[in-house]
């Protein structure tokens, strides 16, 4: 593990800020700021990379209105002018809506409780889109089941478009109508799941659809659930990924009921991912909760960070087991029906403020990216 730390910054101005951002983007998670920078001096996407462990911070007036106050040791007003301090208001990057539980596939590993005809009513979806706009959220992600099977998908997309929010779709890519959707609506980001243990004909058709879709959408990502089957057929997956050329290949640590890998299987997968990334322009990354210190920190290079899960940067509206908001796809805490109440619920705030992580994680310099292990969980 290599690290670069910036120790103390005595002055601050927009030029220093911009250079620092460039540096952090370039070195990504290898760069940690251990001293001197409170959260409010960097843009939101970089909060995750900042660990402000320094001792000269003070609580100034701005801190009183800042959502990150519990995590931040305050502003170094003796060194940096307080005119640069700006209270941060945390809002979700996106709201995920499981618009249907119906699906045309039966993936054995799938975490969704699938049910034919279990579609969310359009009026409910419109209410969520409306509250997302009021909260200042910029994007809505539609997922399922297979969202293409919602009988009023066009109406739903019209509504999101009217509210001027970005559209993200998660799809299995087997339904050709996705191409008409991409022509008719400004979908910003399409995530297609790839799973090779399916019928050859379906796979061939799906690849043809994805190749067409790629021309119609600014961002195409491919997502694969981590399973023994992925490890065994890794080179077959790699071949298809090179053909599809997505912006990113994401792999997901399995959510129950899919089983997690054994230690040995994780080691094998990590080696295969490392080799893939070494030789390919397209990168494969783990995109959901996986502690960064696992396997002698090898995960650090392979992870996108864990802020998409557990309500750190978004909430999920599910229709199962009880319809309403949850911290993510699998969390069991029901957060009610109101988006603002869900986002600012005690449990969601506790998660975001890392109030429940173990003492080891609390002193870890990667805690803002990793989000840590919960106190009562072991590895
Ligand atoms: C549940 S699917 C719904 C959208 C669409 N049907 C699809 O397959 O993309 C959304 C994403 O969840 C992933 N997924 C499914 N089961 C999972 C599991 N047990 N653990 C982690 N991710 C899973 C899929 O790979 C997909 O990228
Ligand atoms: S992963 Fe997607 S395609 Fe597969 S069964 Fe689940 S919802 Fe359907
Ligand atoms: S925050 Fe905790 S789980 Fe994450 S890398 Fe640090 S010690 Fe490991």
Image (spheres, grey):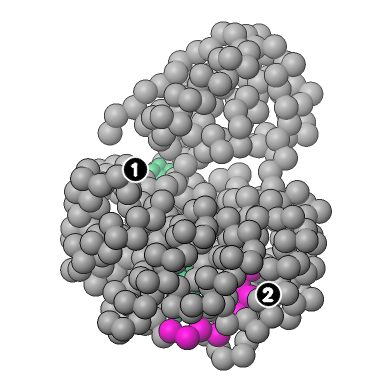
**Quarter containing the N terminus:** top left
The location of residue 252, given as percent across then percent down, is 39, 62
**Residue bearing the label numbered 2:** 154
Residue beneath the point at 56% across and 15% down? 16
Q: Secondary structure at mark 2?
A: helix
The reply to whether residue 245 is in sight is: yes
Region rendered in magenta? 97-105
Q: Is residue 176 left or right of residue 292?
A: right
104 part of magenta stretch: yes
Q: Reply yes or no: does residue 374 show up in magenta.
A: no
Q: Sequence-wise, which precedes: disc 1 or disc 2?
A: 2
Query: The C terminus is located in which quarter?
Result: bottom left
The rendered magenta stretch, by its main secondary structure, is classed as: loop
What's the residue at 61%, 90% (across, down)? Answer: 117
Q: Which residue is disc 1 drawn over?
A: 300
> In the image, is the residue at mark 2 within 8 Å of ligand 1 by its beta carbon?
no
Whether label 1 touches label 2, CB < 8 Å: no
């Amino acid at each position: 593990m290599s690290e670069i730390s910036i120790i103390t910054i005595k002055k601050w101005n927009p030029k220093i800020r911009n250079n620092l951002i460039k540096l952090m983007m370039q070195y990504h998670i290898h760069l940690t700021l251990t001293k001197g920078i409170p959260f409010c001096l960097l843009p939101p996407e970089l909060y995750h990379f900042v660990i402000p462990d320094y001792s000269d911070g003070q609580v100034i007036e701005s801190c009183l209105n800042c959502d990150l106050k519990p995590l931040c040791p305050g502003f170094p007003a003796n060194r940096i002018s307080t005119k640069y301090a700006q209270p941060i208001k945390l809002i979700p990057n996106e709201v995920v809506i499981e618009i249907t539980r119906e699906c045309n596939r039966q993936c054995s590993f799938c975490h969704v409780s699938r049910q034919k005809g279990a579609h969310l009513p359009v009026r409910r979806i419109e209410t969520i889109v409306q509250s997302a706009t009021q909260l200042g959220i910029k994007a809505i992600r539609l997922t399922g089941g297979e969202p293409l099977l919602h009988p009023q998908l066009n109406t739903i997309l019209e509504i999101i478009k009217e509210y001027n929010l970005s559209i993200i779709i998660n799809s299995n890519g087997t339904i050709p109508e996705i191409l008409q959707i991409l022509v008719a609506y400004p979908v910003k980001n399409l995530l297609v799941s790839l799973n090779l243990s399916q019928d050859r004909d379906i796979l061939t058709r799906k690849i043809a659809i994805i190749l067409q879709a790629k021309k119609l959408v600014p961002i195409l990502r491919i997502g694969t659930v981590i399973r023994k089957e992925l490890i065994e057929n890794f080179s077959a997956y790699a071949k298809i990924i090179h053909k599809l050329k997505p912006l990113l290949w994401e792999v997901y640590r399995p959510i129950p009921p899919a089983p997690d890998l054994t230690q040995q299987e994780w080691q094998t997968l990590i080696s295969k991912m490392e080799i893939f990334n070494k030789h390919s322009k397209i990168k494969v990354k783990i995109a959901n909760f996986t502690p960064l210190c696992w396997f002698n920190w090898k995960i650090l290079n392979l992870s996108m960070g864990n802020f998409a899960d557990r309500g750190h940067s978004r909430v999920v509206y599910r229709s199962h087991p009880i319809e309403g908001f949850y911290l993510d796809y699998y969390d069991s805490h029901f957060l009610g029906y109101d988006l603002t109440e869900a986002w600012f619920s005690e449990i969601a705030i506790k998660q975001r403020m890392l109030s429940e992580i173990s003492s080891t994680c609390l002193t870890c310099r990667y805690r803002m990216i990793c989000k840590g292990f919960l106190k009562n969980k072991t590895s």
